[in-house]
Amino acid sequence: MSTGSSFQDNQKIAWQQPYTDRTGTKFRNDGPVDEAKLRTMVEAGNVTWDVVDTSAAAAEQYCGKYVEKLDFSVIDRSAFRPETVSECGVPAFYYGILFMYDTRKFTGTKPTTIADFFDPVRFPGRRIVPPDVATGLLEYALLADGVPAARLYPLDVERALRKLDVIKPITTFAKTYGQMQQSMVDGQVDLALVSTARAYQTLKAGAPFETVWDKTMVNWNDLVVPKGSPNREQAMKFIAFASKPEQAVKFSELASVQSAHQNATPKLDDVQRRIDAFSPEHEHTVVLGNAKWWAQNFDAVTARFSKWLAG
């Protein structure tokens, strides 16, 4: 169970097909991920999913209740940064939320810091931000307002919303990541906070955007096993396989996301290197999201953000 489209096709190529070749296991794919449906299936005792690609915050939030604790005698947790592994999830990939600007719009003074995204006087123009509030929007607002990266959490949500007030009238709050990509390609926006994979597709389509390497919010998705999965043991083995360096490299190269495996070194093309937050020239900008904080606060923050957005 994943996000669908070409992204899930890449997961089939990188993870599923070689696992089928090795073990004979066959897969049925579905998407996009629906966490409400996951909860309903578990509560009804009628679970039809075995492996789900979901946010690290959801893996933390649902751990033990809606998703199984992982079998780390099968899955190698040492392959990942310790702070990214939970009892119920291991990272499938990293993705950055990149601050990008249209070079046709800004030919003189160019944005150089995240504060410039929140400065409509020096940098006028239409903005677009991701559909998910938990991917870095509030963190970027606080960084732009002077909060040090090391002191972001717990997030001061009200302070972040006050900073967002400044650009709210000129910002498109995207419904989907596809909308973000299309808006950038079509020249409908001038500045964007956009995911790595969509940034790649935008640049491949010829859109003249550049990345501001000041602070780069990076999060990750986890592979989890729904509570009561009918194929629990097989699911654990598959996650272990998908977590191996070869599979991590292949998926990273196909999907233009950063590999979560510490020993995986993908061969990136020129465009992928331009947006690689973990490259030697960019890694100093990385600010990792805090999945544990979001797991504890996601519902309350989402409700508050929705009220602010509607107000």
Image (cartoon, grey):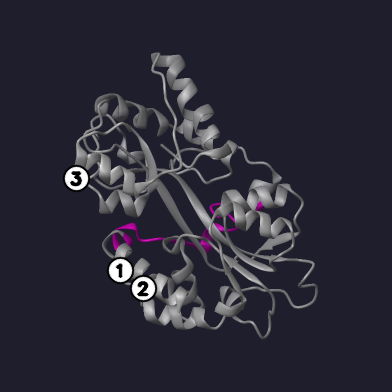
- Give the side of residue 280 with respect to residue 155, left or right: right
Where residue 193 appears, as percent x and y from the top left, is 57, 64
- Residue numbers of the magenta segment: 274-294
Where residue 150 appears, as percent x and y from the top left, is 39, 70
Where residue 307 appears, as percent x and y from the top left, is 40, 74
Numbered circle sitting on residue 304: 2
Q: Residue at x 38, y 46 (%)?
A: 34
Q: Residue at x 55, y 83 (%)?
A: 166
Which amino acid lies under the numbered mark 3 shown in the image of this protein? Gly
- Residue matched to label 1: 300
Label whose residue precedes the other's in the sequence (1 or 3)? 3
How far separated are the C-alphas under marks 1 and 2? 6 Å
Q: Of helix, strand and loop, which one carries label 2?
A: helix
Numbered circle sitting on residue 64: 3
- Which residue is farthest bottom? 121
282 shown above or below 74 = below
- Residue 237 within the magenta-colored segment of the rendering: no
Labelled pair 1, 2 in contact (Cβ < 8 Å): yes
- Give the side of residue 136 with respect to residue 232, left or right: right
